[in-house]
Amino acid sequence: MSTSTFHVAFAPLDVVIPLREAIIIAGTNRDTPYFPGDEAPGTRHVGAFNGDVCIGCATLLRSTWEDRPAWQLRGMAVATIRQGQGVGRALLAFFDRELRPVAPTIGIWCNAREKAVLFYRKAGFQVESERFHIENVGPHFRLFKPWRQETLSP
Ligand SMILES: CC(C)(COP(=O)(O)OP(=O)(O)OC[C@H]1O[C@@H](n2cnc3c(N)ncnc32)[C@H](O)[C@@H]1OP(=O)(O)O)[C@@H](O)C(=O)NCCC(=O)NCCS
């Protein structure tokens, strides 16, 4: 996918780590920017790039939702000076376009910071939990975006 000022593509883990660290990890007490499963074969890292510069990132990990295969979205981050310009929306649209047709998954779930919930809702995610607190990060909600289910066995 591309727009006039950035394009979105799959990316190696090391390319998304600096932005993940700066936007997601900084200010928390987490001691590492790495997530369990980051290097698993099924994991997909995605970046939004202005030239070679990574201005947005996200990671999809193989997971389940209600015992059925689903992606877990983690590490969603847009560089501060590029927030509010459609980069995050383009990352989520990339998943829908590139992964939804090929992966036997029923959708994407994530634990979203409260302040970002409206962003996800605008992209089709539904709130699936009560508000809960993650220590040193803040209030969160669990969200799910359903994809088609007809290709999966019950
Ligand atoms: C949250 C974040 C990923 C959104 O990406 P973004 O590129 O800034 O968002 P976009 O410009 O693509 O916005 C898409 C839509 O969501 C809205 N939106 C974006 N961030 C929002 C927020 N925090 N609260 C409410 N609405 C928001 C935009 O206004 C836009 O709405 P529109 O379609 O009606 O115009 C980004 O701002 C970010 O990295 N924030 C800091 C880290 C963070 O909170 N990450 C999420 C952890 S769960």
Image: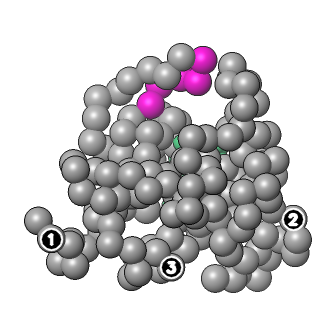
| Relative image position of residue 148 (x, y in whole percent) | 25, 73
Magenta stretch in the rendered image: 136-140
Q: Nearer the viewer, mark 3 or mark 2?
A: 3
Q: Which amino acid is tagged 2?
A: Val
Q: Is residue 58 above or below residue 32?
A: below
Residue 65 can be seen in this image? yes
Q: Secondary structure at mark 2?
A: strand
Which mark is on residue 54? none
Question: Who's the residue at 44% across and 39% down the image?
Answer: 111
Label 1, ligand 1: CB separation under 8 Å: no
User: Do the residues bearing badges 3 and 2 touch, measured as CB atoms within 8 Å?
Assistant: no
Is residue 138 magenta-colored?
yes
Does the magenta segment cover residue 58? no
The x and y percentages for residue 38 are: 61, 50
Q: Which residue is mark 2?
A: 53
> Compared with residue 58, is residue 98 higher up or lower down, i.e. above or below?
below
Residue reaching furthest to the front:
41
Q: Earlier in the sequence, mark 2 or mark 1?
A: 2
Mark 1 secondary-structure assignment: loop
